[in-house]
Image (spheres, rainbow, N blue to C red):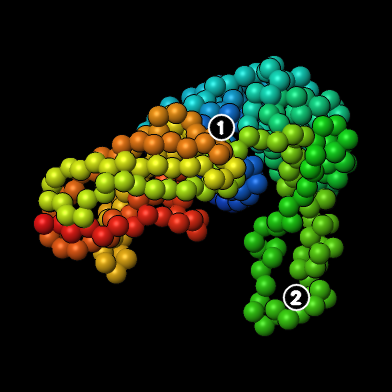
Amino acid sequence: MTFEKEFEAPDVYAAGLFPICPATHDLGIGRLFDLATLLLILDCKPRDAVLDLGAGSGFSTEMLARLGYDVVALDPDFSALRHNRRRPTWDRSRIEGTTRVVQSVAEGLPFRSATFDGVLGMNVLHHVPDLTAVVPELARVLKPGCRAVFVEPGLDHLTSRETQKAIREHGEDDRAFDVMGFLQEARRRGFKNAMLTATLSSELRLLPVEEIELYRSGEHPRLHLRPEGVLEELERRHAFAMIERDGVRPKTSRHPGVLSCDLRADNVPTHVARGSRFQFMAHAANTGDTIWERTPSRLGGFVTVGCRLLSVEGRLLNDRLGRTYLPRDINPREAVSLAVSVEVPADIPSDEYRFQIDLVDEQICWFGDLGGSVLVKPLHVI
C-alpha cells in the first residue's frame, strides 16, 4: 500500500459520513448546531411524520430517523437521494423511525393535504426559484397547528467566498434569501405564526464575565452582543425561522397539554412476600385536557398505570414494579377502572416501604412529576 492510499480520506458521501467526519470537521459542527436548534423549535415527537425538505445525501434524514420520526426525504437531485437511501443501512440498530425518499421539488409537493406533523429544511430555500409557490404548499401538507422550521444563509450569501466557489466549480443555483420577506409571506398565506429565533453560533456570543454588566446595559461595543447586531446576523448571514400552520394540533399523550388525573385505588395490601404477586383495582379520571392514548409503542407516548417502590424516606428504589395498559383511549372528563398486577422483587430486603401508584405517559413523564397528587401506601415486605 502506498503512502498516498494509506492516508487517503474516503468519499464522505459514499461512506455516509458527510458532514460528521474529520474531512468536514468545522462544517459538521455547524450542522449539528443548526439541526439541534431546529429540532428544539420543531416540537415533534417519536412516530410523527416529518418531511425533510431538500434532504440531500441524508445527514438530517438519518438523525430524524434516529429520534423515532417517520421521515420522508425530498430532493430534486437523484444522486443525492441515492446516498440518502443507503445511509440508514450503515447501522440499522440506531434507526428507531422509518425513512423513504421522494424525488421532487418544494414548489409542488407530491403529498396529500395534512400529511405531516412537521417540516424541516436545512439550507434549501435559497435554492428555490419561486418561494411564493412554496409557502402555500407547506401550509397544505402540514397538519393544523404544526410547524415548518428552516435554517438558511441570508442576504449576504451570494457574496461569500464559499458560495462563489460552489457556483464556479459545481454550478450551484444559489440565491440571496430574504428571511423577513419569507416570514411575512407565510403570515399572509395560511400560517398563524411566523418567527425568527434569536440564536447565533456560540463563537459570536461569547461574553467575557467582566463584561456582563455592559451586556445588560444594551451598549456592548460588539455588535453581536446587542439586539440590533443579532437581528442583522439573522437577516444577512444565518437565519433560523419557524412558521406554524393555522389550526390547533390535538392534545394527546404523544403531544400532551395538561396531564392531570383523579386517582383512587381499592384493595391495596399492606403486607406482601418477596417474589409474590398481588392485584388491586385502580380508578383514574382524566381531569386534564389531553387524550390518554392506550396503543403501546416502544417509542412511548401512551398512558399506563405504573407503580414504584420507595424507601420510607422517599428514595426511589424501583420504578419497574409493573405497567398496566389502559383498555381504550381516555378522553378528558372520562374515567377508567382496571385491575393492576404487581410483582414484588425477590431480591429486596424484608422491610417497611412506600408503595406509589401513578399514571405514566411512557417515555415522556410520570403524572406526579408534573406536580399532581399520587397515591402512596405503606407496604411491609416480609
**In front here: 94 or 287?**
287
Residue 373 vertical placement versus 18 (above, below): below
Quadrant for the C terminus, please. Answer: bottom left
Residue picked out by circle 2: 215
**In front here: 212 or 300?**
300
**In front here: 105 or 307?**
307
Identified by mark 1, the residue type is Asp
**In front here: 116 or 300?**
300
Q: Is residue 319 left or right of residue 352?
A: right
Residue picked out by circle 1: 48
Q: Secondary structure at mark 1?
A: loop
Mark 2 to mark 1: distance in Å? 40 Å
Residue 189 vertical placement versus 348 (above, below): above
Q: Residue at x 82, y 32 (%)?
A: 190
State the image quarter where residue 123 is shown: top right
Q: Earlier in the sequence, mark 2 or mark 1?
A: 1
User: Can you give x and y, in whole percent of width and height, for residue 24 in the image?
Assistant: 56, 45
Task: Say few, some or many: other residues with alpha carbon within 10 Å of mark 2 (under 14 / 14 to 19 / 20 or more).
Answer: some
Q: Is residue 184 visible?
A: yes
Residue 271 vertical placement versus 109 (above, below): below
Q: Is residue 59 visible?
A: no
The disc at residue 379 is none
Q: Secondary structure at mark 2?
A: helix
Task: Say few, some or many: other residues with alpha carbon within 10 Å of mark 1 (under 14 / 14 to 19 / 20 or more).
Answer: some
State the image quarter where residue 354 is shown: bottom left
Quadrant for the N terminus, please. Answer: top left
Q: Is residue 209 left or right of residue 191?
A: left
Q: Residue at x 75, y 24 (%)?
A: 140
Front of the two marks 2 and 1: 1
Q: Residue at x 73, y 52 (%)?
A: 197
